[in-house]
Image (cartoon, rainbow, N blue to C red):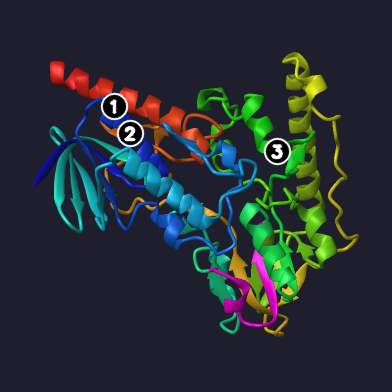
Amino acid sequence: MERAAAIVIGAGHAGLAASHFLSARALDHVVLERGEVANSWRRERWDSLRLLTPNWQSRLPGHHYEGPDPDGYMTVPEVTEFIQRFAKVSSAPVLTGANVTRVRRTGDGYHVATSLAEFRCRAVVIASGACNLPAVPQLSDAVPSSVEQLTTFDYREPARLPSGGVLVVGASATGVQLAAELQRSGRPVTLSVGEHVRLPRTYRGRDVLWWMDASGVWDQRHDEVDDLTRARRLPSPQLVGTPERATLDLNALTPMGVNLVGRWAAVRDGQALFSGGLRNAVSLADLKMDRLLDTFDAWAMADGRWSELGPPERFASTRVPESTRLQLDLRSGEIRTVVWATGFRPDYSWLDVPVVDAKGHLQHDGGVVESPGLYALGLPVLRRRKSTFICGIEDDARAVIDHLAGYLAKRQSS
C-alpha cells in the first residue's frame, strides 16, 4: 500500500496542471493515468481534428505555444506533444497504465485501487474529464441492423465508413466538422440539428475566441452564471480550426449539399422521425449569437478599443429550406451509416463515494466536491466559462489546489 498526500486521476492537461500546483506547494502526490499522458488525444480523436482555440491561446502553467504559427490551430499530434512536453518540463510524477478501479472514503482520507497498485491518500483530484463515454440516445437501439452506427470515439476518417449516405446526429462543433468532411468525401450527408451555439470564426478582424478572452466573457465565474446547470450542458460552438480561419455554420454546410433536418425524436417501424422545430432552433441560435456580438461591441467601446478593430458585423440569418424532411426510411439503403455526434458523459463507475447525482454528474461547487478532500478539474464551467479549454485550466487548478492545500493544513493542525 503506497501513501501520498494527494492522488490526481488523469494525466491530461487538467491533471498535469493540478500536479504543477501541488509540486509548487511541495505536496507529495501521484498522477494516475489509465493509458499514456494525453491518452484521450492519442486514442479518442478523429484524424483531421484541430483545436478550436488559436495556438497563441494554448497555454498551461509556465508553458505556452512557441511555434511559428500563433494564429493557426494545433493538430491532434501537436496537442499530444504539447501536453506531453508540459508533463516533462514540470516533472509530473505520472504513473501510466494505472487504471483506477475504485475510490472509497476511509477514516483519514481515501483508498484508491488501480490495476497496478493501491494507494492511501488524504485528498483526491478527479481530472479524468467529462468526455469518457459517448452520450448516445436510447433510440439508437431501434435503428435497423443494416445501418452501421458509430460514435465520434469510433470515427477516424471517411474512407473507413461504408459507401452511401450518412446521417450525422448533432450540430455542435463535432457534428458540423464531420458533416463537412463526409460531404466533401462524396457521401450524401444529412445533419440532424437540435440546440446549438452559432459563432463566426472571426469577428471584426479577430478570432472570435480572442473576443471571448479579451472581453471577459470567458472569465465569468460559475457563481455569477444565471442558470449554471444549463450552462454546463451547452454544446460546443460551431467552430473549426483551419488555415483559412473559415466559419463553419449551417449556412456554410448547405451550399456543400448537406441536408438539414430537425432533432431526431424517435424511430418507428424503421422510420427515423425528426422534430419540426428546426426553424425555431436556428432562430434561437442566431439570436444568441447577435446578443454575444452586441456584448463584444459594448466592451470594445467601453475599453477604448473601438478604433483599433474592424467595423461591427452582423451575419445573415441561418437559411432553412421551406420544408424539411420529417422522416427518413432507414431500411431503404439511403442511409448506410449513422454517426452520433451527440456529446459525451463522464464515467464515475469507479467512484464509490456518494457524490454523483441521478444523471451521472459530479456534485461540486467550483471543483470542491461534496466529500471532504475530494476535488474535480476539467469539467464544463467548473469555475469559469473557459474551464474546459486548455487555456482555462491554470486559474481553475490554482484555485482548487489552494483549497486542497488549505484543507490539508487545517487537518494537520487539528
Q: Residues within 10 Å of mark 1 (few under 14, many from 20)?
A: few
Residue under pointer 2: 20
Up the image or down, 396 lies above or below 144; here it is: above
Disc 1 is placed on an element classified as helix
Q: Would residue 137 appear left or right of 351 to someone viewing this image?
A: right
Q: Which residues are magenta?
A: 155-170
Q: Residues within 10 Å of mark 3 (few under 14, many from 20)?
A: some
Can the viewer see residue 387 in this picture? no
Q: Would residue 186 appear left or right of 347 to someone viewing this image?
A: right
Question: Residue 240, percent across and down?
Answer: 67, 51
Gap in angstroms between the C-alphas marked 2 and 3: 29 Å
Residue 24's label in the rendered image is: 1
Question: Residue 89, percent across and down?
Answer: 34, 40
Q: Residues within 10 Å of mark 2 (few under 14, many from 20)?
A: many
The disc labelled 1 sits on which kind of residue?
Ala
The disc labelled 3 sits on which kind of residue?
Asp
Residue under pointer 3: 207
Question: Residue 383, percent across and down?
Answer: 48, 29
| Residue contact between numbered discs 2 and 3, judged by CB atoms under 8 Å | no
